[in-house]
Image: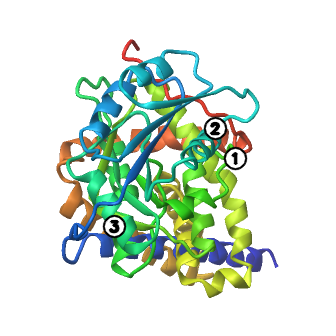
Amino acid sequence: MQQDILIVAALLLSVVVLVPTVFFAIECLAGSTGERSQPPRQNGRRPKVAVLVPAHNEELQIIDTLHSIQSQMRDGDRLVVVADNCTDLTASLAREAGADVIVRFDPVRRGKGYALDAGVNYLGLLPPDVVVVIDADCWLEPGALDNLAYMTAATGRPVQSRYLMVAPQDESINLAVSEFAFLLKNRIRPLGLARFGLPAQLTGSGMAFPWATLRDAALANGNLVEDMKLGLDLARAGHAPIFCDAAAVSSRFPYSKKGLETQASRWNAGRFALTAHLFSTLLDVNTLRSRAYLALVVDALIPPLTLLTALLLLSLLAAVPLATSGIAILPLAISIISILAFDIALSVVWWRHGRRTLPMHAMVDIPGYMFRKLRLYPRHILQAGGAAWIRTDRNRNH
């Protein structure tokens, strides 16, 4: 009886890990092969754009961000900053830079979702064709605003730019592994989904929406991964976002380990909080009827890279004793297939896209990176119910 329980447990673990690993591998391989995506055609009148910048205590970055946006704006475009529960100079600096500024104070209803809702209500007085959301610590690469505007108008769907993070120029900590993980999540995997005609997750900054779509969206919430939730909600309503690799938006990682941990804590706590809801949606027959929504749900359920690696090793460790003792070979076979698929996918992505970001000599940092991440996961799970908008610490003096 005990032996049967061990076999079932090992088999179940290997299968549970196999499913997200296979989806992960397919996304990575598809995103690393095929022709390079082309910018959208820029025929006819460029839609009028309102750029919405939600900001919480971003006085250190806000000016550079606004100048980057303004350099790509055209006649008739608008720039709106929502200074949400700020205790610094964000609002005054944004006004001096020429942006329309909404100052919002609400100690209870805090979060990016509430800031976006306030901005959309303000824009409703004079609606634009397209609304583009840019975080207050980002900059636009050349042509990004035009590419987002044209693709959104041409498709009538939300559009997610290629949003990547880079290490600060004077970095004091090694961020090569973090950069590669971000590249994998925010570019390669969305490209892979796009190769199959599937939608993309909203990843936070560089998001563009047709006015009618954003106007009717339920934005006012304090969810820690409000962007991913918004994309999933829109996909369920029939407005699945698409990926635009030609529009690039960039940001820098925090300068300190404290800032990195704060950022990771917010993202992972939000992801874990959303996971239970996503599992329940798989039991809903309406999810299975919507190819676009189902694809995004499955993609969102793929664990973070470090956690997926740990689960692969755990399934292998559970299967090896059963196989070596002659009790059961199937769990080990499934685990090996999962690990091979994972390793092949990562190797192809690294060879095609990641060698500059993660050079060979930097791979010695991978075990330490994984250990730091795994050490923080229990705390992130316990924080999964939190909803505070905590500014990432980007102070250089650490």
**Which one is nearer the viewer's eye here, 330 or 117?**
117
Amino acid residing under circle 1: Asn
Amino acid residing under circle 3: Met
**How far is disc 1 from disc 2 in space, using C-alphas?**
7 Å
* Mark 1, residue position: 221
Measured as percent of width and height from the top left, residue 326 is found at: 58, 81
6 to 137, vertically: above or below: below
Evaluate if marks 1 and 2 touch, with contact meaning CB atoms under 8 Å apart: yes
Instruction: Residue 329: give its label.
Output: none
164 to 39, vertically: above or below: above
Q: Residue at x 40, y 57 (%)?
A: 185
Q: Is residue 85 visible?
A: yes
Number of residues whose C-alpha sits closer than 10 Å to that of mark 1, classed few (under 14), some (14–19) or many (20 or more) = some
| Helix, strand or loop status at disc 1 | loop
Measured as percent of width and height from the top left, residue 311 is found at: 55, 60
**How far is disc 1 from disc 3 in space, using C-alphas?**
28 Å
**Which one is nearer the viewer's eye here, 48 or 190?**
48
Measured as percent of width and height from the top left, residue 392 is found at: 50, 29
Q: Residue at x 74, y 77 (%)?
A: 3
Amino acid residing under circle 2: Gly
* Mark 3, residue position: 151
* Mark 2, residue position: 111
Evaluate if marks 1 and 3 touch, with contact meaning CB atoms under 8 Å apart: no
Closer mark to the observer between disc 3 and disc 2: 3
